[in-house]
Amino acid sequence: MLECSFGFRPRRSAHDALQVLVDEAWRGRRWVAESDIANCFEAIPHSGLMTAIEERISDRHVLKLLRAMLRAGVMMDGAVTRSDTGAPQGGVLSPCLANVYLHRLDRQWADRGTGVLVRYADDLLAMCRTRQEAERALSALTTILAELGLELKPAKTRIMHLTEGGEGLDFLGFHHRWVRGNTPRSRHLCFLARWPSRQASQRARNRIREITDRSRLLVPVEQIVQDLNWFLRGWSGYFRYGNSAREFNKINHYTVDRLARFIGKRHKRGWGYGLKVVAYHSHNRLGLITLNGTIVAPRPNRPWRPGTPNAHR
């Protein structure tokens, strides 16, 4: 695999890909051609995929097993459907097979593309220095994918410029925007900031609402708090590597509000009663964790996680 590929690979993560955006924007590549591959897992042709696999694997038993897996089909509503394209949805090997096939895109990009390609599975973008370069990058992506039997998703394909006061882009759950520093020491600097996208924050609220739904009123409050903590630790563990303090504060308040409403309903009292129990009668909010103080702001040309070398050079 090449350096531009980050998804479903050992010792690589989404944050490695996100760090490339920070680094390249700092270096002046702020014209972005962004898109994703339409129906990627369903559209990969079996013949092309097996040809790509056979470049490295010659064991006929392994190849026979892979062909059988691709021909197995998918069961929907009790009926099995088979196709000459696509990797089985939900298959443990499907992400790896998609990477193997899209490796052909990465190799062609090295020869025919312009700018810096960042690909996480079927989500991709190219960072360029000028609009003309971004247009050539988008054209190259369209042409190469067509040769592979794939296409970009029109609704998510665009060219945009990261500039102060301009619009941003959503990538890998974060919203990215070119901003100016807001402290006396950083007001002369502009940089690429990121925080949880609107969709990511809404999904978090939806999950918190599910955990504290009135249908769970018979569940002990201790279990509700434990479920909330499990979710918040996982969600914040991903989004803490960003400029996420404001969004974290909103999720903190929303979680306390939902827990207070849950306790109020459980005791057939109002929201105010529940808030007193959570915020005042308990010294630690009934054990509910807080997301304050967990942020690690990204920096250009520095490891995204302390003690971890940058995967992008």
Image (spheres, rainbow, N blue to C red):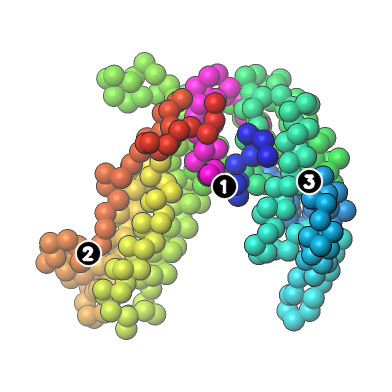
Element type at mark 3: loop
Element type at mark 2: helix
**Which of disc 2 and disc 1 is earlier in sequence?**
1
Q: Residue at x 27, y 47 (%)?
A: 292
Image position of 298 (left or right of 48) = left
The residue pinned by badge 3 equals: 56
22, above or below 17, in the image? above
- Residue 27 part of the magenta-drawn span: yes
Image position of 276 (left or right of 164) = left
Asked which quadrant contains residue 132, the reply is top right
Separation of residues labelled 1 and 2 (CA atoms): 35 Å
Report x, y in % for residue 1: 68, 39
Q: How many marks?
A: 3
Disc number for residue 10: 1
- Residue 152 part of the magenta-drawn span: no
Q: Residue at x 32, y 72 (%)?
A: 224
Report x, y in % for residue 280: 12, 62
**Which of disc 3 and disc 2 is earlier in sequence?**
3
The residue pinned by badge 2 equals: 287
Nearer-the-camera pick, 51 or 191: 51
Separation of residues labelled 1 and 3 (CA atoms): 18 Å
